[in-house]
Amino acid sequence: MFTPQGPTLRELAVQALSSTMRGYDLLAPKFDATPYRTPDRVLEAVAEAARPLGPFGRGLDVCCGTGAGVGVLRGLCGERVTGVDFSAGMLDVARAAHAADGAGPAVDWVRADALSLPFVQVFDLALSFGAFGHFLPEERPGLFGQVHTALRPGGLFVFPVGAPPEVGSPAYWSLLGFDLAMRVRNALWRPPFVMYYRTFPLAGVVDDLTDTGFTVRLLPLEEFGRRADGSPRVRLVVAARG
């Protein structure tokens, strides 16, 4: 992370002590040089898995950040694409990144809270990458309800979900330590910075989507292999609005 292009330790510390929105405004110019940006192989795998589910007219990238998911949608949708995020700084970077790219449909950039989307039955496809850690578990039904309202009947909400790391593995302790540190930070410091890695379990997510009115199926993304028990390392959640 500490490369000439990425944020410095001081910049990360200032971000971590800011609100979620202000933190991303500050990080935005260097965000794509951090490990937080969704890897291209994930974007490509989702695009390939979603393409046979179309065709799609209008697409929505929920919590679009610097616009990586918008690039996926421009390859999948034939009419228009919208990126929505609550960070003005992230939207500025996304807008600049796509301004010179004439490939695919036109893009609209909308600043809005994902828990209060200004859309009603507009989109055929919604997706999201790497944003769900910014929502507490009790906020998930509201988030999914907003996406459900934004989709046309028959529209799809798709996103990848990785399997949790094995208990006791280095990744397990790393994510656990991060979440515990964030809980301590938010208990002692205001405003909060909401970002957790262990609050989006697949079973609970499927239940919340179903309760919201989606019909859910899970597609394995075989590019990422399988665990020792045979289960996929990464699944694509495909939630259809009835």
Image: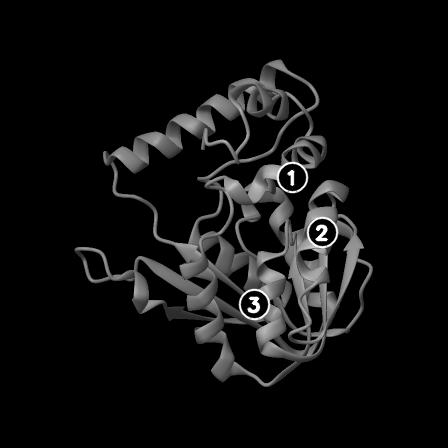
Give the mark, 2 or 1, whose residue is nearer the N terminus.
Answer: 1
> Mark 2 to mark 1: distance in Å?
22 Å
Single out the mark in the foreground, 3 or 2. Answer: 3
- Please identify the quarter of the rendering in which residue 54 is found: bottom right
Residue situated furthest left in the rendering = 228
Is 203 in front, or is 161? Answer: 161
Label at residue 72: 3
State left or right for residue 217 relative to residue 70. left
Residue behind mark 2: 114
Give the mark, 1 or 3, whose residue is nearer the N terminus.
Answer: 1
Residue behind mark 1: 29
Secondary structure of the residue carrying numbered label 3: helix
Q: What residue is shown at x 34% (from left), y 47% (from top)? A: 164
Give the mark, 3 or 2, whose residue is nearer the N terminus.
Answer: 3
Q: Residues within 10 Å of mark 3 (few under 14, many from 20)?
A: many
Q: Residues within 10 Å of mark 2 (few under 14, many from 20)?
A: some
Q: Residues within 10 Å of mark 1 (few under 14, many from 20)?
A: some
- Please identify the quarter of the rendering in which residue 26 is found: top right
